[in-house]
Image (spheres, rainbow, N blue to C red):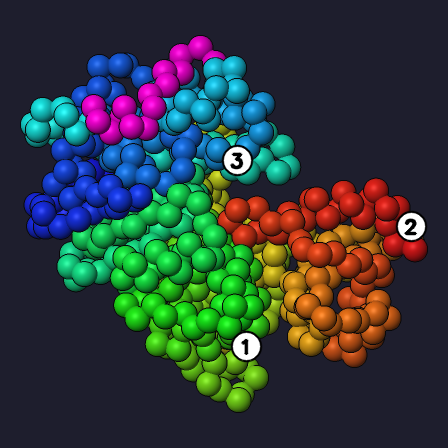
Amino acid sequence: MNLLMALEMAADCHPDRVAVTAAGRGLTFAELLQAARGAAARIRLSGVRYVGLLDINSPAVPVALFAASCAGVPYVPINYRLTRPEIEELLARIAPALLITEEATVAPLALPAGISVLPREVFLRAALAAPAEEMPTTADPGDIAIQLFTSGTTGRPKAAVLRHQNLMSYVLGTVEFAAAEEDDAILISVPPYHIAGIAAVLSSTYACRRMVQLPNFDAATWLQLARGERITNAFLVPTMLSRIVDHLVQSGATADVPALRAIAYGGGKMPQPVIEQAMRLFPGVDFTNAYGLTETSSTVCLLGPDDHRSGFASADPAVRRRLGSVGRPVPGIELEVRGDAGELLGPGQSGEIFVRGDQVAGEYLEQGSVLDTGGWFPTRDRGQMDEFGYLYLEGRADDVIVRGGENISPGEIEDVLLEHPAVSDVAVVAVADQQWGEAVGAVIVLKEQASATVAELQDWVRQRLRSSRVPAVIRFAAELPYNEMGKVLRRVLKQQFAGAGGPT
């Protein structure tokens, strides 16, 4: 099964149901299919190798995604927040390509040869005006459907490839066809170049759920749109949910979104105090924590609504702790935690997370497959599982602090510091140390009108963890550097510590 078949099924079942809306414009599922086929005809005639998108959320996003599938070429959404040289380098790697964008976006760029620019509105008008004729896709399940460039934080971005069979395995394993009611609507606020945005389009299409797209996120606009469009479902990254919570608390307003039934979140670490506050502010809403990666076609673990409710209501610390987990593997996914020598670890033991399943691609254009001989993908995330199978993330393997030969996870220290009544946000990173090689550094954001000293915070950690976990140096900041998907930019903090000379 390829991606276009999901849209064909939706259009056949509910042709007149609205599929996508943004800024007052809407397309039904039948119109979305017509536009995808019309755009695919142009793509085939152009002879390009890729369909690129350098743009914000709009109806052009699902049209381009399904048109690329119909034409049998990979769809490549690119991060428009990258620097000019970074964007130019990525465009050179997909030429010849048809690039859907805005003229203002590409005006500052030196476009590589072979990049044909098609403005968003021109693309949509031409797609909708094309003859409404059936055009079967040439894509096989084993063909590349999506190519996503990694963030490139440690070097040249890698081109992660997802095949139709990987993506549809995820959709078929997690979504019931046409399960959405006619008045169901999902608010998509994650950017189109992220796997969560792609998964939202594919899952919503297969469920026949109306997609409402938010081009640029801010808390007030999100709430306004959720009310006005009677949103029933939403996906947010942790920083987005945190900003919504802060907006409601600071304004003293109520959420006032009576149609909202479910919020899923993922893409970064969710502080437990934030999710607990969100559950108080949205008491009738089901919360789900979704953990996944680009290379796994999105979600591989879920902490569902029942786990959220039981954890929130429980006085048992072991049960309440589950609010800080990412839940258990979804159907079709196997998960292991392994030690440094590749040995299988038991409950409560920290190591690298490996996953296996049909939706797991684990493949890069330049490198090929990185799956091991057993089909397992090394996520490069560290964590541990408890005796009930709940997974707790501890950060990226590259973020581990090696102090005198001892591996220290930043996550466990961050969790302890977040329990301090004065701490609003925290990030822990490795800092250079002459005696130990690396030491623990922490950047703290205090709550408004709260205060805490370095010694007080160090003592707070010392009373709850081993002495090696106590931050050797603590710095205070007004806010932490995050990317748009809610992941703290630890490399920026490490550079700041290095510039300051490390611990004293």
- The x and y percentages for residue 179 are 18, 60
- Percent position of residue 464, x then y: 74, 77
Marks 2/1: CA–CA distance: 36 Å
Lower sequence index among marks 2 and 1: 1
Q: Which residues are magenta?
A: 112-126
Label ID, residue 321: 1
How far from the left and from the top, in percent, is residue 156? Answer: 59, 29
Of the 4 image quadrants, the one containing the C terminus is: bottom right
Residue 143 % position (x, y): 29, 32
Q: Residue at x 45, y 58 (%)?
A: 220
Instruction: Please give the name of the residue rendered at 67% of the width and 55% of the height, measured from the top-left corner.
Output: 479
In the image, residue 113 lies in the stretch drawn in magenta: yes
What's under tag 2, amino acid-wise?
Answer: Gln
Residue 23 vs residue 55, the one in the foreground:
23
Name the residue type under label 3.
Answer: Arg
Q: Which residue is mark 2?
A: 434
Residue bearing the label numbered 3: 81
Q: Earlier in the sequence, mark 2 or mark 3?
A: 3
Gap between marks 1 and 3 measured at Cα: 36 Å
The reply to whether dot 2 and dot 3 touch (C-beta < 8 Å) is no
Count of labels in the image: 3
Nearer to us: label 2 or label 3: 3
Q: Residue furthest bottom?
A: 315
Q: Quarter holding the N terminus?
A: top left
- Where on the picture, by quarter, is residue 355? bottom left
Quadrant assignment, res 258: bottom left
- Which is more N-terminal, label 3 or label 1? 3
Q: Decide whether residue 136 is among the magenta residues.
A: no
Q: Nearer the viewer, residue 500 or 463?
A: 500
Q: Is residue 259 above or below residue 309?
A: above
Indicate whether 227 appears above or below 3. below
Say which of 487 and 399 sits in front. 487
